[in-house]
Amino acid sequence: MTRNQKIALIGSLLAGSGLVASAASLPPTNAVEAITLTLMVTSQGPTSTNDVSTNSSVKTSTIKNSEVIAAIGKFLGSNYTASAKLLEINPVTFETQIVSTTKHGVVTTKTNLYAYATKLGSIVIQEGTNRTDVTDFFVGTGTSTNSAVESVEIQNGLPLKDVKYKIDNVVCTIPGNPTNSFSLQGYSVRSFANVTAPRGGTVGLYFQNVSPLIGTTGNGGVAVGTLSIGQPVTFDYPKP
């Protein structure tokens, strides 16, 4: 089930539970999730020969956010500093939701401001206040050939739990830079959580952790590591 299908399902459950949506009282915003990548790479080193022997060696290196950002920046002609960040941007729109529940014949009404991250996030590099969309460098990430195993809990019409387990692909292709390009697979746990927004309201977001993550780099190296998408979460709001 895709994320948009999931939102449609949750929406139908909300409607069936007495939940009513009216005009939004908070402006649309972006939920911004941090991406953290750490890979240890073992690749072929130099080979030396003499009259009696041939010696081949291996070398180890790391690929983290900084290496990926620098490599993409070089391709784009941008010289990013150490403060540049790799982020996932999820557009969200708040709705006023009126939830009515009945217990022992007593009807209780509660008003919530709620939003779902209904679109798949785009990936950006942020330097200061400037953002560059680099999603195209990660085409293939998030795809999977296996079906997911999932646990979902909805209470009083609101999602409390949604955890999906599967084997996910994580791909980065940087033209002219095979050292920092990679094609990996890993054990992915994607979980739903409700996050309180700074201006009020609650946002339903998905957090992901892929570990262990294994595969190869573009230059034939063997890579192992982790990927997380989630904390810290920040929000964009238009200026008053």
Image (cartoon, grey):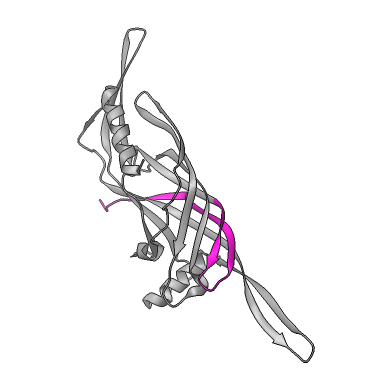
Q: Nearer the viewer, residue 65 or 48?
A: 48
- Does 239 lie within the magenta span? yes
| Whole-percent x, y for residue 161 in the image | 44, 33
Taking the spot 65% from the left edge, 82% from the top edge, the residue there is 46
Taking the spot 54% from the left edge, 65% from the top edge, the residue there is 216
- Does 71 lie within the magenta span? no
Please state if 121 lies on the left or on the right of 182 as rendered.
left
| Whole-percent x, y for residue 153 in the image | 43, 29
Q: Nearer the viewer, residue 128 or 126?
A: 126
Please state if 106 lies on the left or on the right of 138 as rendered.
left
Q: Is residue 79 visible?
A: no
In the rendered image, the vertical position of residue 174 relative to residue 85, given as above or below: below
Start and end of the magenta stretch? 211-240
- Quarter of the image with the N terminus in it: top left
Taking the spot 50% from the left edge, 71% from the top edge, the residue there is 218
| Whole-percent x, y for residue 227 in the image | 52, 55
Taking the spot 46% from the left edge, 73% from the top edge, the residue there is 71
Residue 5, picture quadrant: top left
In the rendered image, the vertical position of residue 23 relative to residue 89, given as above or below: above
Q: Is residue 119 visible?
A: yes
Looking at the rendered structure, the number of numbered marks drawn on it comes to: 0
| Whole-percent x, y for residue 210 in the image | 52, 51
Please state if 61 lies on the left or on the right of 144 as rendered.
right
Residue 2, picture quadrant: top left
Please state if 224 lies on the left or on the right of 206 as rendered.
right
